[in-house]
Image: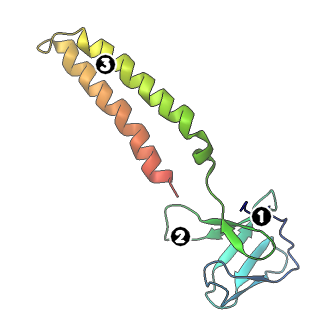
Amino acid sequence: MQPQKAQKIDLSADYPCPTCHRRGRLVSITLTEAFGCSRCKQIFVVEESGYTIEQLSTTHPYKKSWRWTGHQWHIAHSRLRDNYLPIALFIILMLFVVGVLVSNLQPNSKNFGILALLVFMSLLVPLLHWLAYRR
């Protein structure tokens, strides 16, 4: 079964709250492109495309977003998910290149320590970036 296609969000329509699980209702906030929940008091902003809403929150390091299918809200996944294969191939290529470079060095040389530090940092930065921006 394929997921339903996202529908454009109408600012004058009434929607169930995605965080209250249908207990609260999203009510349009006057003169803005935002909704407020009648129960949990969360504020949701309609993104520029008009197909997703994003929760405004100061307590989470990332923002949650949902898309409306006509009957219910579905979590809008990040675009990074579409790019896993190129990212994985790039990491594998970098590990191969670094492995070839390390295999040609003497373990007691000064260059080996510098290269080992560079390898560690080059692997640590993407890992921290992924941890910070994953949903």
Q: Nearer the viewer, mark 2 or mark 1?
A: 1
Name the residue rendered at 73%, 60% in the picture: 2
Q: Secondary structure at mark 3?
A: helix
- Inter-mark Cα distance, 2 to 1: 31 Å
Q: Is residue 120 left or right of residue 8?
A: left
Query: Residue 70 or 122: which is nearer the viewer?
Result: 70
Residue 117 found in image quarter: top left
Name the residue rendered at 77%, 64% in the picture: 4
Identify the disc placed on residue 89.
Answer: none
Name the residue rendered at 65%, 77% in the picture: 18
Q: Which residue is mark 3?
A: 99
Query: Residue 122 or 75: which is nearer the viewer?
Result: 75
Q: Amino acid at mark 3?
A: Gly
On the image, the x and y values in percent for residue 103 come to 24, 13
On the image, the x and y values in percent for residue 50 come to 82, 62
Q: Which residue is mark 2?
A: 58
Q: Is residue 127 left or right of residue 5?
A: left
Instruction: Give the vertical position of 71 relative to 76 (above or below).
Output: below
Give the mark nearer the N terminus: 3 vs 2. 2
Q: Amino acid at mark 1?
A: Gln
Q: Which residue is mark 1?
A: 4
On the image, the x and y values in percent for residue 111 come to 22, 13
Around disc 3, counting alpha carbons within 10 Å, would you say few (fewer than 14), some (14 to 19), or many (20 or more)?
A: few
Residue 46 found in image quarter: bottom right
Q: Nearer the viewer, mark 3 or mark 2?
A: 3
Around disc 2, counting alpha carbons within 10 Å, would you say few (fewer than 14), some (14 to 19), or many (20 or more)?
A: few
Give the mark nearer the N terminus: 1 vs 3. 1
On the image, the x and y values in percent for residue 124 come to 35, 38
